[in-house]
Image (cartoon, rainbow, N blue to C red):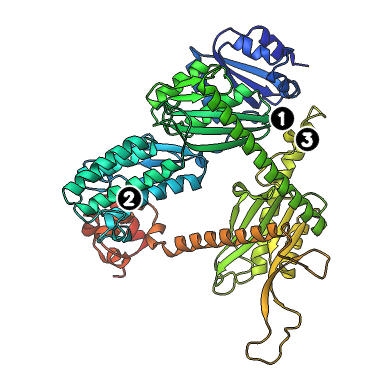
Amino acid sequence: MLPDAVAQKLDALPAQPGVYLFKDRKGIVVYVGKAKSLRSRVRSYFQEGSGDNRAFIPILLRTIGDLDTIVTGNEKEATILENNLIKEYRPKHNVKLRDDKDFITLRLGPTGSDGGASGWPRLEVVRRPAPDAARYFGPYHSATAARRTLHLVNKHFQLRTCSDIEFASRKRPCLQHQIKRCPAPCVREVDRGWYAEQVDAVATFLEGRHDELSRELHERMKNAAIEMRFELAAVYRDQLRAIEKVREEQRVVTIDDIDRDVLGFYREGDLVEIALLHVRAGKLAEVATYSIKQAEIPDEEIVAAFLAQHYGGSLARNGDADGADAPLALVPDEVILPREPEGLEGIAEWLADRAGHRVALLVPRRGHRVDLLALADDNARHSFAEKQRHSNDAQDRLRDLQERLRLPTLPRRIECCDISHLGGGDTVGAVVAMTDGELDKRRYRTFNVRGDAVRDQAGLVNDDYGAMYEVLARRFRRALQAAVPAADSLAEAPDVDAAPTETSGDGEWDAPDLFVVDGGRGQLAVALAAAHDLGLHDLSIVALAKERDVAPGDEDDGSAEGPAEKIADRVYLPGQKNPIALKSTTTSLFLLARLRDEAHRFSNRARMRIGKRVRFRSPLDDVKGLGPTAKKALLRHVGNLAAIRAADDATLLAVPGVTARHVKALRAAFPSSS
């Protein structure tokens, strides 16, 4: 039954465009949507019918406690407001494609007129484009695709690859210049007109206008050969070959030259697969696929959410409230859709304002666009089948792992801990995670080991067991704290028929199904002690160790080489004397080895990061009232710390940005020996 307050609001809904917010019984926003007519759209969720909305009705009846509506002037304003409200409330029933930072774009810097680094643009990978004068290309569906394109451009188009800081400090050409991949504008005289041609060629290449670029490069190659500039002609020749290789991999799908994206759609229950075909100048340039889980809303609302997040979501945080001033990642002239979302005209107008050109959103009924849509749907269906097969294989491996380790539950979530240090210093603990057989980097954690109880006289943490106990105790304590709110919410739940996805939670600190420690029996005993001391007696814990293994029959025969040895992985279980050996044919147990190796990598990286910060730390960092700008100015104009301490007040005040307040702070921190 609907609450009386919701039923009354349904009768009073206006027939105007706007945004609606569904709230649960605790007042938490669980869904945000937009409508051309609030009255007809919101009421349709609760009317009997045979549409996709029927799948959403049980969820609403189970969770809805209140309803809010906001009237807007037009559909475009409703689209902007919906996008902002979703980012503010993050409702659990709205489709969330991926986190914004995961959408990778390529940034081609603007051409400046000064003599510094800004006068020589470069191509770089960025995750969150900024509202500047640069050009952005993408977003790319994976870091591999973006970096492959970046590598291709850096190999054949001679743009600088160094950062602005490296550019300013460079005294002689780098290796990129030696291998003919950079003209070295940092230290050599380079023709600005020629460099600008390279920048424009890169932009044309990334926009997919390969035919146009090929004609231009062919003409430049001929002119360079006529002028007997054969090295330059060879550069243009190599660029032409690279473009031809890319064109050979592209499939011609249309006879027109319109840049368009085609959105394929496939759904089974609450699992949705979207395939996005990038068609540039009539050729299929790339196919990107996206998976959406627990999609309980209608198809057309999933399509609308995808458009907002893919083409606009990654930039709206950097511009104004609606992101209108932010430069949009490449949006084609036309987007072909499988379903018609609510407020299609408003979405198209919003994208057109942000892209700077007209954007057509089409739902074709006949013609060649229908064939393109069928091709995209086939790609979505194929991608769904492949990912399901991969998921089923992972489930089989997890079930085999459960059986071999005699675990009470299927280990869908596994975590592994490793301790890294350098001679007892810079000690850090790392916990990495795996979900359904795949590394889950959202749950990676690092712990700076305090180790006050296990330090030696030199102040170093030389007790590996003590460091591991501290890290695991802190990790398990977080798991207990995360379990308390979940238990409270279950006790307060008004509906016993609540869906599992609503009560199982996805807390970042929830205890895993299986915890692995890097080490042998000693590390296993420490992990069990840390868990049992906190009352975690049901957590499955094992240890994974690399040990030397002497093959049978290869015992020591007195030779200089000694017995033949090899390194083998073994799994130690609580209460079991003999470990389980990892055999090359046991793929399920190699999930643990993969996770252990990832823990090694992550802990070593964290330890090196901490060590770098400690070793690069200056005593000036401890001076209260001395900021980073003043510190850099002092080091640049005065010199090292000894020179700063020996300098008189007049010398220090002559440094740009240094005031009497800074000098007073320096004298208090480093009193004069005289």
Q: What is the crowding at mark 3: few (fewer than 14 residues within 10 Å), some, or many (at least 20)?
A: some
Res 233 label: none
Q: Give the residue pinned by disc 3.
A: 490
- Residue 419 as seen in the image, left or right of residue 399: left
Indicate whether 102 appears above or below 330: below
Q: For mark 2, does the 10 Å Cα neighbourhood hold few (<14), some (14 to 19), or many (20 or more) residues?
A: some
Closer to viewer: mark 2 or mark 1:
2
Q: Residue furthest bottom?
A: 558
- The residue at the point 21 percent across, 41 percent down is 113
Residue 497 in which image quadrant: top right
Mark in the foreground, 2 or 3:
2
Distance, label 2 to label 1, CA atoms, is 50 Å
Q: Tell me the amino acid under the disc marked 3.
A: Leu
Residue 254 percent across, percent down from the top left = 46, 28
User: For mark 2, what is the residue?
Assistant: 238
The residue indicated by pointer 1 is 269
Tell me the distance, in whole angstroms, between the alpha carbons under discs 1 and 3.
26 Å
Q: Is residue 493 above or below residue 432?
A: above
Give coordinates of residue 355: x percent, y percent: 40, 27
Quarter-wise, where is residue 503 in the image?
Answer: top right
Q: Residue at x 38, y 41 (%)?
A: 107
Q: Position of residue 644 (x, y in %)?
A: 29, 63
Q: Say whether residue 37 is left or right of residue 435.
A: left
Disc 1, SS:
loop
Who comes first in sequence, dot 1 or dot 3? Answer: 1
Q: Residue at x 23, y 51 (%)?
A: 232
